[in-house]
Image (cartoon, rainbow, N blue to C red):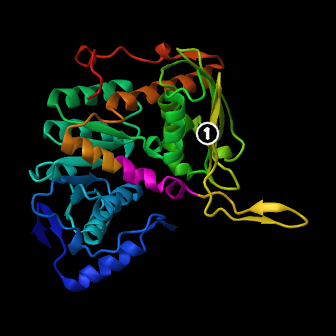
Amino acid sequence: FVNVGGGWRVRDERMMRILDDRRRKFHVGRVVMAVPVPDQTVAAQKQQPGERRVNIGIMGAGRIGQVHADNITFRLKNANLVAVSSGSKQLADRCSLEHGCRPFYEWEEMLEDSTIDAVCICSASDQHTKQIIAAAQAGKHIFVEKPIDVDLAKIDEALKAVRKAGVKMQVGFNRRFDVNYARVHKAVRSEEIGKPHILRITSRDPSPPPIEYVKGSGGIWLDCTIHDFDMARFLIGDEVEEVYSLGAVNIVPEMALYGDVDTSLVTLRFKNGVIGSIDNSRKAVFGYDQRCEVFGSQGSVSINNNYPNSAVISNSNKIERDLPLHFFMDRYTDSFIYEMNEFCECVLKDKPIPCTGLDGRAPVVIALAAKKSYQEGRPVKTHEVDVPLPEELKGWDGQ
């Protein structure tokens, strides 16, 4: 490796050819990334004189860490991937080799690297808050995957550190950057459908997660529906004040052993009077089911599932098309690129962060209310599960 413009790059020509081949065939598990990789060599991606980029270090080299690493290295023009840390030497070395960055086996050591401007936290959820605090104290800007934590007190401690340090922090609710949801958001905010009355979100996974994952996930509302809670706030532009949830175990009986469900229906009441519903399932046999509608006084706006193609077959017996995209990495490929690009633009140009730490906190409150509602069989006001903001965070907009 050689250091180019503050970032580590591969010097060996043979290795560069291998990297070029790998990035054109990039896989996440068994899923092929849908966005084409620019037809350039790794060397052509190097920082040009006078060009400003954010030097990023990734914490956590699992599935989502690999996705961000690939996007930063091969798809963004405003960032360099300079380091990766993982408790797994194998994962850190693999990411380092594939992306030409320096490996660290302790994330604390990576934070000591003065060439790093920002960190992308992709580690296990229970590691997020302490890594946020440490990164803020080290003066690094922060991109963190959801959730920040499932404990509001821990979230608040992390946000206090961010505000005190004066660094930027963006939470990775990538669906905000999906072009379909963005169009719904625009239609609502520009009053194309008048005043919103009803929100309906359907979000169903193609298959349930392993039971070992369920044990530490925090449950369906903190793990799965939390994306939808964020989207509900994003689309309606107001806070949820009351939650009522129903749940059932229809797919994986073992989930009941951990107090979790695999089928859920949540109703929301917003402070501005809008009512909403979110239905989730851990298994939709036809693929990744992602639909949404906002109904208003002057009309409605809705989005449907994305498909691998637009072909429709019609004959004397039936009209049919192929199944929807099967996995979240297929459905939301572009949104992961857009969210990281926007984070880097905010750092470079000192722009407001589009999804702040406070935005990351709010869906956790809603999820905790949903869990309490299910456990107690009644509607729950969000203030019942929320905790007062510390004095250090009052009046702060998260920027």
User: How many labels, in total?
Assistant: 1
Tell me: 266 left or right of 329.
right
Image height of 386 relative to 90, above or below: above
Name the residue located 31 percent from the left edge and 65 percent from the top edge. 74
The quadrant in which the N terminus is found is bottom left
Q: Quadrant of residue 317?
A: bottom right
Identity, as a three-letter code, of the amino acid under mark 1: Leu
> What kind of secondary structure does the magenta stretch mostly adopt?
helix
| Residue found at the very far bottom of the displayed protein | 14
- Residue 206, how many percent across, how many down? 63, 53
- Residue 343, how many percent across, how many down? 29, 44
Q: Is residue 190 visible to the viewer in this orientation of the structure?
A: yes
Tell me: 285 left or right of 27.
right
Name the residue located 21 percent from the left edge and 51 percent from the top edge. 107
Q: Quadrant of residue 64?
A: bottom left
Of residues 22 and 373, the one nearer the viewer is: 22
- Residue 146, how many percent across, how many down? 40, 40
Name the residue located 39 percent from the left edge and 16 percent from the top edge. 387
Q: Which residues are magenta?
A: 327-339
- Residue 68, how many percent across, how many down? 35, 56
Tell me: 69 left or right of 26.
left
- Element type at marker 1? helix
Image height of 3 relative to 137, above or below: below
Image height of 121 relative to 25, above or below: above
Image height of 273 relative to 48, above or below: above
Magenta span contains residue 6 = no
**Which residue was labeled with disc 1?**
257
